[in-house]
């Protein structure tokens, strides 16, 4: 039996310990905000925060996060008003929106590590997250806005 | 992403109706009205856009099931005053789920903060055509949605006038209430809802539409998309997010070669994977398989992760079938050879052969654009629950009506027994116009007797998609002594989308040749547009902008090459080729105009010139750029819009390419939401850069050689344009709306390639750029 804390709540899993965290979150725990995009840590759609680090849930097993604290988009802020989420809305970032949970979690992790990133630092640290609609200009502006006060 | 306008040849489209005549449908009020509380009787629901009511005509009525203009289908008002407006098109990122209801709210004087949007299920008899493709939602629905909103407003006004016993002309709806200014009385929409429902629907001819100068929302761009909060909090509901009690998770192993068949399989190892419950054969359809499933073996599990692991453990033997020898290197040679010989002549003006022979100089460009994959972030996915002769589907489909028809046909049940719930789409780009994934879910649910989710992996998406065509575009331009272009021969060789529907297809369909080949707008005396034969060996489908991508790349690169050969400025060369402001009327059989009448949507070179001039002015064409940088320009009319782009590139001494700045001008006629237009154009630049820099799907032994985002790359943030500026050409008072979602893509690649030439002196004719700049 693996125990893991997700968004402050203890969850347990007695199935395949190698199950990717992504599918545990989505199919077993019902937290569908974290998305599947590639399964190979190439696109960042499944980004969650594990103990303050941005992690790709598609290549992280449930066993890897045993006893650790996982934050998903659903748990980032109780009312959805994390500075990154507010900035995203202010800049009207999304088009289809499918990659945005991963982008937001990546941006939130970036700001925990570096509260005032430069534009180059934003572009570099967000480049693991693909947006096929092409919202990059707005993502960059929203991260900048979140870092300077929404 | 256009539906074929040539139903005679393609039997799969015959089923879609293509009604020539307007039909009056009888629709039960009970089924369409909740908030207004009416029962019994019938209402009119018909595509009744009269000539008098419109300043222009569109092709909306010619779409399958036409247009329904009826407030009772689209609007309900609750006693609490909440106005619910139905969004009947699919939301894949363009903002259509916001902009169409916004039009209704504008006309009915509803306060947007008290409006809810409800997604329509797939029912084209009730809602009219729902195919969200071809960049035509606003184009076809601006006027119908205004009429629906004005009808609802009129009914609310009439109800208030009756309540007060005053003439209807004395009352007016203003911001969610009806006001009688003479007496100062006011009633909220909620208070009037029940009475308004009893009013008859006003005739369209008598409707008074709002004066655009009183618009609160249209053309302003201050309203965010309705799903913005849900998207930023993980609550937005995509096809992938549907969960039903007792639902099983399925992943399918499909034939690695299109048209291949399963010979045998061994499920034992898969069944040993923890969480795997069953392994089943999936029915496939013979090549060409239209939108039907390819077949294969499904692994059913308690979660997707187990299903994927189970599939990896399957032992499978395939017969590769008729396409097992498809090889991209060999095929390219075939296309190139075909382009060097005469082909089916589609447009002929003057004598291009003679003029090329007599020309002072002939410039030849042979341009190549390979297959591309859509790779929307949400891979194909669908949930089905089939019980007896009833089916319910939840899916991110661009074609809710077509999906309903195909599910009914595939299961052999009446269409009325199929419900298609349309979720948000995590990107579409044309891929989700084809409902094969929903059909797979329906077949598996039927067999299992339980709800099933079919999840495609990224590898499935790339290996088993409906790819963008592959083409060679060969252009020969003949110049006289003064450098004027006097001859133009363009041969386009590419397998057609029609090949996915009809075996033996070797020529492109009118809707493909009309995308930048025969509608070429230049003022040249001798023109020949030709289409040599090309057969298809994989599934070809609509990809955002479709054939406009290779055509704009070829035509606008050739403009750059002419400028290069004559030592003239790119923009001046382009304007000289476009020539005088005029309406171009190419003599072409079945001339495709994106389904629109020529009268409303002519090929207008004044508008083409205007787009070029606006982008040149705002984008500071001719500005000094640092060493290693260059500017390129291109313009293209597609989806009846006119778009011009300037790209600034920087290429360093190692050949590394960056894009400091992009400027785009779009003339899309009358528009609804400039903020979403800007986002579409910003995104189009990135999709254009992706396909130019990396986009290539190749085949060997019939199999796609790429598998995921590592070998089918798309542009990431660190290489995306630093800034993209968007300028919208102000429309004339009666300029009809035109496309936005797709037209931004085609001019990007040629503007980029022309800029690379300006920066480096290297002329790239084959996409993707790949390592060509490193040489």
Image (spheres, helix red, strand yellow):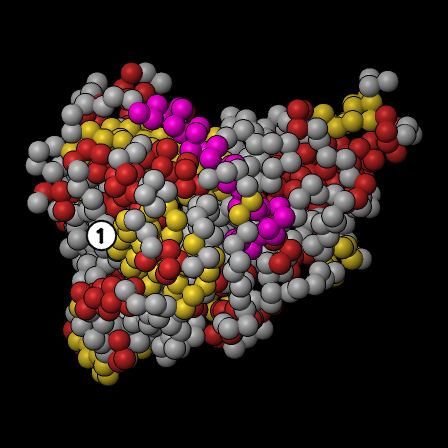
Q: Quadrant of residue A4?
A: top left
Can residue B452 be seen in this snapshot?
no
Q: Is residue B376 above or below residue B565?
A: below
Write the start and end of the magenta stretch as one range: B593-622
Quadrant position of the C terminus of chain B in the picture: top left
Q: Dot 1 falls on which chain?
A: B
Can residue B287 be seen in this snapshot?
yes
Give the percent coordinates (x, y) of residue A123. 21, 30
Give the percent coordinates (x, y) of residue B116. 58, 38
Give the percent coordinates (x, y) of residue B767. 23, 51
Q: Quadrant of residue B183?
A: top right
Q: How many marks?
A: 1
**Residue at image point 21% right, 38% down:** B757
Q: Residue B603 colored magenta?
A: yes
**Residue at image point 76% right, 44% down:** B52
Q: Secondary structure at mark 1?
A: loop
Quadrant position of the N terminus of chain B in the picture: bottom left
Q: Residue B224 colored magenta?
A: no
Judged left or right of residue A74, residue B512 is right
**Residue at image point 53% right, 48% down:** B584
**Residue at image point 78% right, 23% down:** B179
Residue that lies at the very extreme toward the bottom in this rendered image: B263
Judged left or right of residue B404, residue B338 is left
Is A20 or B112 nearer to us in this picture? B112
Q: Quadrant of residue A66?
A: top left
Give the percent coordinates (x, y) of residue A32. 34, 47
Q: Which residue is mark 1?
A: B766
Is A46 or B772 nearer to us in this picture? B772
């Amino acid at each position: 039996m693996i125990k893991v804390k997700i968004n402050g709540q203890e969850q347990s899993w007695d199935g395949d310990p190698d199950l990717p965290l992504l599918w545990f979150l989505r199919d077993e725990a019902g937290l569908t905000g974290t998305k599947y995009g590639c399964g190979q840590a190439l696109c960042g759609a499944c980004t969650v925060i594990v103990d303050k680090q941005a992690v790709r849930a598609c290549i992280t097993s449930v066993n890897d996060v045993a006893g650790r604290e996982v934050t998903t988009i659903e748990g980032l802020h109780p009312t959805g008003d994390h500075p990154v989420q507010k900035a995203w809305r202010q800049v009207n970032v999304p088009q289809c929106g499918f990659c945005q949970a991963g982008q937001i979690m990546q941006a939130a992790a970036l700001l925990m590590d570096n509260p005032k990133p430069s534009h180059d630092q934003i572009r570099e640290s967000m480049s693991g997250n693909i947006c096929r609609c092409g919202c990059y200009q707005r993502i960059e502006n929203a991260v900048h806005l979140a870092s300077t006060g929404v | 992403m256009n539906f074929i306008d040539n139903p005679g040849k393609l039997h799969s489209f015959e089923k879609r109706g293509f009604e020539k005549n307007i039909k009056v449908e009888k629709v039960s009020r009970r089924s369409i009205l909740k908030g207004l509380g009416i029962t019994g009787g019938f209402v009119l629901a018909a595509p009744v856009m009269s000539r008098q009511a419109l300043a222009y005509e569109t092709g909306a009525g010619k779409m399958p099931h036409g247009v329904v203009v009826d407030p009772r289908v689209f609007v309900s008002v609750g006693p609490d005053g909440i106005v619910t407006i139905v969004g009947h098109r699919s939301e894949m990122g363009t903002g259509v789920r916001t902009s169409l209801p916004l039009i209704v709210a504008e006309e009915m004087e509803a306060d947007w903060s008290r409006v809810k949007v409800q997604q329509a299920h797939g029912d084209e008899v009730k809602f009219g055509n729902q195919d969200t493709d071809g960049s035509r939602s606003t184009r076809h629905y601006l006027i119908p949605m205004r009429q629906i909103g004005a009808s609802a407003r009129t009914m609310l006004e009439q109800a208030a006038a009756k309540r007060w016993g005053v003439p209807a002309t004395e009352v007016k709806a203003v911001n969610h209430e009806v006001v009688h200014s003479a007496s100062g009385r006011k009633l909220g929409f909620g208070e009037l809802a029940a009475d308004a429902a009893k009013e008859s629907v006003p005739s369209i001819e008598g409707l008074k539409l709002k004066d655009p100068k009183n618009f609160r929302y249209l053309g302003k761009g201050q309203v965010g998309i309705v799903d913005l909060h849900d998207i930023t909090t993980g609550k937005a509901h995509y096809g992938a997010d549907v969960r039903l009690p007792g639902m099983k998770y399925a992943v399918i192993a499909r034939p690695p070669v299109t048209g291949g068949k399963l010979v045998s399989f061994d499920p034992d190892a898969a069944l040993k994977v923890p969480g795997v419950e069953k392994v089943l054969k999936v029915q496939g359809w013979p090549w060409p398989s239209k939108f039907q499933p390819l077949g294969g073996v499904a692994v059913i599990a308690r979660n997707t992760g187990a299903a994927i692991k189970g599939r990896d453990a399957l032992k499978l033997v395939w017969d590769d079938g008729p396409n097992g020898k498809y090889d991209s290197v060999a095929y390219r040679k075939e296309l190139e050879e075909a382009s060097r010989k005469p082909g089916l002549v589609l447009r002929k003006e003057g004598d291009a052969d003679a003029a090329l022979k007599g020309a002072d100089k002939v410039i030849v460009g042979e341009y190549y654009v390979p297959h591309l994959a859509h790779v929307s972030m949400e891979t194909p996915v669908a949930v089905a629950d089939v019980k007896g002769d009833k089916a319910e589907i939840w899916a991110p489909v661009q074609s809710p009506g077509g999906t309903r028809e195909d599910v009914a046909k595939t299961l052999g049940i009446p269409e009325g027994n199929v419900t298609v719930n349309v979720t948000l789409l995590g990107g579409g780009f044309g891929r989700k116009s084809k409902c094969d994934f929903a059909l797979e879910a329906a077949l598996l649910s039927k067999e299992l007797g339980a709800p099933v989710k079919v999840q495609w992996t990224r590898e499935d998406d790339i290996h088993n998609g409906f790819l963008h065509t592959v083409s060679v575009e060969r252009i020969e331009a003949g110049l006289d002594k003064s450098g004027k272009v006097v001859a133009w021969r363009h041969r386009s060789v590419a397998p057609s989308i029609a090949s996915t529907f009809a075996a033996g297809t070797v020529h492109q369909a009118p809707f493909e040749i009309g995308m930048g080949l025969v509608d070429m707008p230049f003022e040249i005396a001798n023109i020949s547009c030709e289409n040599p034969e090309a057969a298809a060996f994989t599934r070809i489908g609509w990809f955002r902008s479709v054939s406009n991508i290779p055509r704009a790349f070829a035509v606008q690169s050739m403009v750059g090459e002419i400028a290069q050969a004559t030592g003239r400025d790119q923009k001046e060369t382009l304007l000289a080729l476009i020539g005088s402001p005029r309406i171009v009327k190419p003599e072409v059989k079945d001339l495709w105009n994106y389904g629109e009448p020529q009268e409303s949507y002519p090929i207008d070179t004044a508008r083409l010139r205007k787009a070029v001039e606006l982008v040149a002015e705002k984008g500071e064409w001719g500005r000094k750029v640092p060493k290693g940088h260059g500017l390129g320009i291109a313009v293209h009319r597609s989806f009846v819009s006119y778009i011009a782009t300037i790209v600034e590139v920087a290429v360093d001494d190692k050949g590394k390419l960056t894009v400091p700045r992009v400027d785009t001008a779009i003339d899309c006629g009358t528009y609804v939401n400039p903020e979403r237009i800007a986002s579409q154009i910003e995104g189009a630049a990135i999709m254009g850069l992706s396909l130019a820099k990396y986009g290539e799907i190749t085949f060997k032994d019939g199999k796609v050689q790429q598998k995921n985002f590592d070998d089918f790359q798309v542009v990431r943030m660190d290489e995306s344009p630093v800034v993209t500026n968007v300028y919208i050409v102000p429309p004339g008072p009666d300029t009809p709306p035109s496309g936005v979602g797709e037209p931004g893509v085609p001019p990007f690649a040629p503007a980029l390639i022309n800029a690379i030439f300006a920066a480096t002196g290297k002329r790239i004719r084959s996409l993707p750029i790949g390592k060509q700049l490193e040489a």
